[in-house]
Amino acid sequence: MAQLTMVQAINLALAQEMERDPRVVVLGEDVGKNGGVFRVTQGLYEKFGDGRVADTPLSESAIVGVSIGMAAYGLRPVAEIQFEGFIYAAMEQLISHASRIRTRSRGRYHCPLVVRVPYGGGIRAPEHHSESNEALFAHTPGLKVVVPSTPYEAKGLLVSAIRDPDPVIFMEPKRVYRALKEEVPEEEYTIPLGQARIATEGKDNTLIAWGAMLQPTLKAAALMGERGIHSEVIDLRTLSPLDTRTIIESVKKTKRAVIVHEAPRTCGLGAELVARINESALLYLEAPVERVTGYDTVMPLPKLEQYYLPNAERVTEAIGRVMRF
Amino acid sequence: MPKKTIKTFHVEWLQVLDERGNCDEELRPPLSDKEIQKLYEWMVLARAFDEKAFKLQREGRLGTYASILGQEAAQVGSAFALQPGDWMFPSYREAGASIVRGLPLKMVFQYWSGDERGSRIPQGQNDFPITIPVGTQIPIATGAAWAAKAKGDKIAVMAYLGDGATSKGDFHEGLNFAGVFSLPVVFLCQNNHWAISVPVSRQTRAETLAQKAIAYGFDGIQVDGNDIFAVYKAAHEALGRARVGQGPTLIECVTYRIGDHTTADDATRYRTEEEVREWREKDPIDRLKRYMGKKGLWDEAYDHKVALESREQVEAAVAEEEAIPPPDPRDIFRYTFAELPEDLKEQMEHLFGSDGRPNP
Ligand SMILES: Cc1ncc(C[n+]2csc(CCOP(=O)(O)OP(=O)(O)O)c2C)c(N)n1
Ligand SMILES: [Mg+2]
């Protein structure tokens, strides 16, 4: 088995799905000859040609809009939005059409579309290149939201997203893109959407994270483990629909929870997770659920971003608080 | 009933100074010798800045940077036509225009080094901070022009944009509003032929970008963007019309991005060396230099002095910028609202650990 980065794993998933299903097409800005600004689509243009890997004019709204039309007609578009900060012009298409065409047409049409979008901070990128805006999509009924945390996860989840009959926002943690390698099978495998994964088992508390926040969360768990406190780490994988059962079962067992996300705190996905835990496991809790999040501010530029982004230290402090409560 | 032609349109091309420095004196804008030298000096400074920014990035002393190499005439010529009371809305590739407007060099370095204080445009300079989401500055510039008109101010607004930006909805919407309300705004499009790896032929089937103005009911003109006289003339006239209530103009400056898209890009992946070489021969600075030489406005000694002074200015700006202490982490919060709400104050306290040091 090959050791791959997340960029390579996603690239492999795209190539294999395009090979397998002629309906799969890739479109976006710079995805062709340039192979994408992160090289995620590298080699696809050479292999599948302009008809299936299209550099588009610079319009996020049209990239998503035409993809909806393609999907309704019978293709399986995988659109790339270059950075999360540029997806906003496409929000109308996503919210008013992609998410609801199945409902509006009472099932006559549906939208098997994947929008791939690199997200998140920690790579010292310019303005509008470091946000974590997953909650906007999770708040939109009818959109699925998937955030892989490792190369292996990314391949299996992307294949499922492409084969899914509904629109999926596939958010790629750019900070993880090349930061770690792991064994990724060449052979086909899928990871079902809507199922969280227990990344580490533990009995003392539950840590919930996704995407780029998984690594600092695992690190915090390891640090606390040395002190005899054993965290169960849940990698959420799919933010919508949420795997409530896995979360509740874990919290009932550990009785304490910490949620970690780099998005702003207010109305971040953490708030929804706390609500679900309260609804289904309140009487099991030994401490209020803690959130380690970004702040309710604009994402700062590189010189201040380390103060904004949650890190292992902030997570360990939160674990300490739920344990001491 | 036979079909008949009810409207025909034409698109003008303006060049004053050709590649060999030959000038059409009848078309030449009325600039004094001193002003012509000033244009030259701004372009040399802009290039010196650009070279240094690139080097600093490679040395790890600056973040991602978008080079203006090759676009000096389009930027300097257009910004030179602005008056201090005018407003200006730049994209991210406007270092040249911004310094002509008066932005201290050190602030341009500061912004690209990842320090937001570089976006605090000095009082009295009516420029917006640079805009990264492509084309989004266009309707905003239109709105500022609307406000100027509403208040009866005799100023003009200039919005800078690239060829790629013409594909955005914001371009259509911003220009349409400008036309409908006949607003004092000039849209200065630098068609540098590329939007990262996507050629302008992938942005539009139209033969020019200038002609897009026609559909909005106002003038569009295509100029040689490497000819600083043509750029200045077109901008000067368009701004003049805007200031007296004659509405908007779209100016397409045909130029070329000699460098990579940004320091994070590798243009050899998608374009030929040959194409770049062809455009290098149309260099905007060389062209003006040749003209000035013929007019006795340029000699080796002058050139040496201008180059030296530019480099010194740039080096001084770098030294100044690098001596600035790092920003206060509280700045993350300070500008969120006019007044910081209680819960944000609380979050701000979390920046600091129990030892009083910032958290990470
Ligand atoms: C809305 C939006 N989409 C994508 C990007 C990423 N991006 C940055 S610059 C660029 C190309 C812009 O080309 P153009 O308008 O021609 O300006 P140039 O860079 O050539 O000056 C792209 C796609 C962005 N900044 N904003
Ligand atoms: Mg361009």
Image: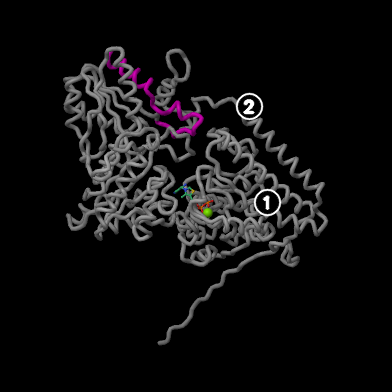
* Amino acid type for the residue under numbered disc 2: Ala
* Of pointers 1 and 2, the one earlier in the residue sequence: 1
Q: Are marks 1 and 2 on the same chain?
A: yes
Where residue A209 sits: x, y (%)? 30, 29
The secondary element bearing badge 2 is classed as: loop
Few, some or many residues within 10 Å of mark 2 (<14, 14–19, 20+): few
Q: Quadrant of the N terminus of chain B?
A: bottom left
Q: Position of residue B241 (x, y in %)?
A: 63, 60
Kindly report which numbered mark, 1 or 2, lies closer to the viewer in this rendering: 2
Query: Which label was assigned to residue B80?
Result: 1
Comparing B37 with B80, the one in front is B37
Q: Which residues are magenta?
A: A296-325
Q: Left or right: where does residue B140 sit relative to residue B237?
A: left
Q: Residue at x 63, y 61 (%)?
A: B224
The x and y percentages for residue A188 are 23, 44
The residue lying furthest to the bottom in this view is: B1
Q: Position of residue A299 (x, y in %)?
A: 44, 34
* Mark 1 residue's CB less than 8 Å from ligand 1: no
Residue B119 position by quadrant = top right
Residue A315 in the magenta stretch? The answer is yes
Residue linked to disc 2: B323
Q: Is residue A147 above or below residue B276?
A: above
Left or right of B320, for residue A27: left
C-alpha distance separating marks 1 and 2: 30 Å
Q: Is residue B10 left or right of residue B171?
A: right
